[in-house]
Image (tube, grey):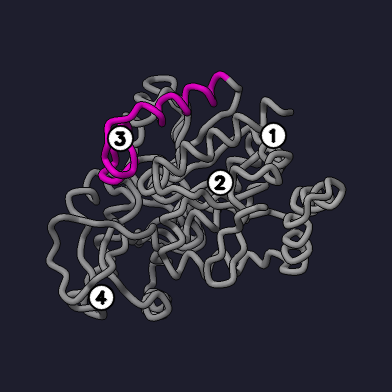
């Protein structure tokens, strides 16, 4: 019997289920979030989710590379941080700063590009053409000078602050932390001359902060409107000329779920399902409940033809969503093992 992951009426099939095998077997490119997904709490590579020393994640990444599966990091981190992580993990490309920075390769041979979304449609600085930025300013500095952050702080007193020191050394996006009503923030930013958007990149646990009355702290990115992890993944898939079934997204935040709108399938690590906003985002993917209902009954039967029919219905789902049973790095290893097994079974 398959053990469905029932969360608020979501019926997510575990990524290790045999029903996931035909879908995973086609995957050649994995777009993965970093913090809260691939790495253990604290951004650690060589520990389990609970903090015990472990090389399982390193082994999983190595095995995927041997199997010909490319892993692309999609993170809110800046280019300096992402480049070093890329080098340490022996990977080749990343999408950084919430979809605004793309780098392929290293050093002098690195290809670096930026996405500024709707900024191309407006005059950012007097005397320049739409979308142009003075040579002595970065997009990050343009946002700082706009005053938008101060207005957000005024709208959410003691509920929002800079995410220091992690928000430093950035080129495009401003990084904040706290807890805000996203609809209110969206309405406020819609009044700005500079097209901006606030993106939720998941729950974090900073040891030091000055927030008051905030039980659940989120990492937020203030970005050029029209940019996101999702749009950057879509552009990268198009650049690589990949078919949807070749691609998979895995993550723990709303921004990661939205990546799955452009990949053939989506995996959420178990800790993602503690976040109501993530659950709502998964629900919005509109997985056909009829297909899931039909899939559940045959799985309770021992008849092989019924089980086969169930597996077929899952393999035909558009953009299926799977979940891991474990959290963060442990969940990522669980996913990697399922993918490797699917490749072996063909």
Label 1 sits on residue = 25
Q: Residues within 10 Å of mark 4 (few under 14, many from 20)?
A: few
Give the mark nearest the N terminus, 1 or 2: 1
Would you say residue 123 is visible in this rendering?
A: yes
Magenta span includes 41: yes
Residue at position x 40%, y 74% from top?
182
Q: Say the numbered circle drawn on residue 47.
A: 3
Number of marks present in the image shown:
4
* CA separation in Å, label 3 and label 1: 28 Å
Give the mark nearest the N terminus, 4 or 3: 3
Would you say residue 130 is visible in this rendering?
A: no
Label 4 sits on residue = 151
* CA separation in Å, label 4 and label 2: 34 Å
Could you tell whether 50 is left or right of 193 in the image? left
* In this view, 330 is above or below 302: above
**Which residues, given as a range, are shown in magenta?**
40-66
Estimate the x, y position of residue 31 in percent, counting from the top left: 53, 41
Which corner quadrant of the image does residue 198 belong to? bottom left
* CA separation in Å, label 1 and label 4: 49 Å
Estimate the x, y position of residue 72 in percent, counting from the top left: 50, 35
Judging depth in this view, the residue of 7 and 244 nearest the camera is 7
Q: Secondary structure at mark 4?
A: helix
Residue at position x 64%, y 40% from top?
247
Estimate the x, y position of residue 216 in percent, counting from the top left: 28, 68
Q: Nearer the viewer, mark 3 or mark 2?
A: 3
Magenta span includes 39: no
């Amino acid at each position: 019997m398959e053990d469905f992951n029932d969360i608020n009426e979501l019926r997510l099939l575990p990524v290790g289920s045999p029903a996931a095998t035909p879908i995973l077997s086609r995957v050649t490119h994995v777009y993965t979030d970093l913090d809260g997904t691939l790495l253990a709490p604290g951004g650690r590579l060589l520990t389990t989710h609970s903090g015990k020393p472990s090389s399982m994640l390193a082994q999983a990444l190595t095995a995927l590379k041997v199997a010909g599966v490319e892993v692309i990091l999609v993170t809110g981190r800046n280019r300096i941080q992402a480049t070093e992580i890329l080098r340490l993990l022996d990977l080749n490309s990343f999408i950084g700063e919430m979809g605004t920075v793309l780098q392929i390769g290293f050093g002098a041979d690195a290809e670096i590009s930026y996405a500024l979304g709707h900024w191309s449609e407006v005059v950012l600085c007097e005397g320049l053409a739409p979308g142009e930025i003075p040579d002595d300013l970065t997009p990050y500095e343009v946002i700082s000078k706009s005053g938008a952050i101060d207005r957000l702080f005024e709208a959410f007193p003691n509920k929002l602050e800079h995410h220091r020191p992690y928000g430093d050394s950035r080129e495009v996006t401003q990084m904040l932390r706290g807890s805000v009503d996203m609809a209110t923030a969206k309405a406020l930013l819609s009044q700005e001359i500079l097209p901006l958007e606030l993106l939720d990149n998941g729950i974090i646990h900073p040891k030091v902060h000055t927030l008051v009355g905030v039980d659940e702290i989120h990492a937020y990115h203030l970005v050029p409107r029209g940019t996101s992890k999702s749009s950057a993944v879509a552009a990268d898939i198009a650049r690589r000329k990949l078919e949807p079934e070749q691609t998979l997204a895995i993550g723990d935040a709303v921004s990661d779920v939205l990546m799955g709108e452009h990949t053939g399938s989506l995996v959420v690590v178990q800790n993602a399902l503690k976040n109501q906003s993530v659950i709502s985002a998964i629900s919005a993917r509109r997985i056909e409940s009829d297909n899931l209902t039909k899939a559940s009954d045959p799985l309770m039967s021992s008849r092989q033809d019924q089980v086969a029919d169930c597996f077929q219905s899952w393999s035909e789902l558009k953009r299926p969503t799977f979940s891991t049973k474990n959290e963060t790095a442990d969940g990522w290893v669980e996913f990697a093992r399922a993918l490797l097994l699917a490749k072996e079974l063909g």
